[in-house]
Image (tube, helix red, strand yellow):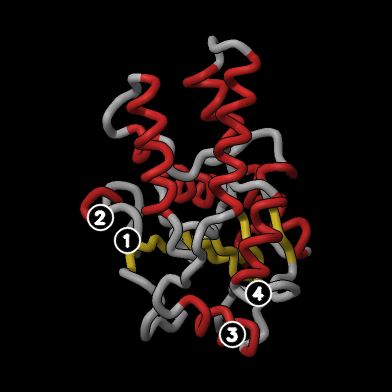
Amino acid sequence: MNRFTAILFDFDGVIADTEPQYDLFFDRLAAKYHLPENFAALIKGTTLAAIMEKYFGNYPPAEQAEIIEAHRRYELQMDCAFIPGAREAITRFKAQGYKIAVVTSSSTEKMKVALQKMNLENTFDALVTADKITRGKPDPMCYLLAAEELRVSPAECVVFEDSIAGITAGKKAGMKVIALSTTLPAETLSPYIDTIIPNFLNYEL
């Protein structure tokens, strides 16, 4: 008997094919501020607050605010195409009776706009964003909060993630984690996770 009752989705790179757009934004930021060339890959799955603290904490408050606002404007205008098979998987999991949630490092404002663009408003039973937590991925706080909001135990949850930070968070929460190689290649993910799928096409839990 399947012991799982809830499906928890990361958003960017799992439901929405937005990670290449983030790469463009953060690559430009890295060039401007002389950050590592692989900056976009280094920060995958982490909250903007954590990025700002780690890489821009020594900059003047006005400059930090300018970066945050540029990021906010960029997110709100991004295209939100589905990862192959994601729309169908969400519909199928709901029809099968699973509780479903989005657990993301993005802001509530961004998520409301993105879900509306994708016609997914009112689809999920819970939405955990960066605004609801004080410790972002790889800390398990976000996934534990999602389980609490869904009123299920962590052991009943399946997590779909595309970043190492997200995979780590889900595993620390005591949940089953399945990785998608949509953002990072399978060989990069394999030291952290056993189950890796390319996308949701033809996928059955």
Q: Residues within 10 Å of mark 3 (few under 14, many from 20)?
A: few
Q: Rounded to the nearest whole Å, what is the CA distance between mark 2 and mark 4? A: 28 Å
Residue 185 got which mark?
Answer: 2
Q: Are marks 2 and 1 in contact (CB under 8 Å)?
A: yes
From this view, report whether residue 56 is shown above or below residue 38: above
Residue 181 got which mark?
Answer: 1
Q: Amino acid at mark 2?
A: Pro
Q: Residues within 10 Å of mark 4 (few under 14, many from 20)?
A: few
**Left or right of 147 in this view: 103:** left
| Dot 4: element | loop
Q: Amino acid at mark 1?
A: Ser
* Position of residue 169 measured from the top left corner of the image (x, y, whole percent): 53, 45
Q: Rounded to the nearest whole Å, what is the CA distance between mark 4 and mark 1? A: 23 Å
* Position of residue 65 measured from the top left corner of the image (x, y, whole percent): 64, 25
Marked residue nearer the N-terminal end (4 or 1)? 4
Q: Residue 120 appears in which quarter of the rendering?
A: bottom right
Q: Amino acid at mark 4?
A: Leu
* Position of residue 78 measured from the top left corner of the image (x, y, whole percent): 52, 57
The residue under label 4 is 120
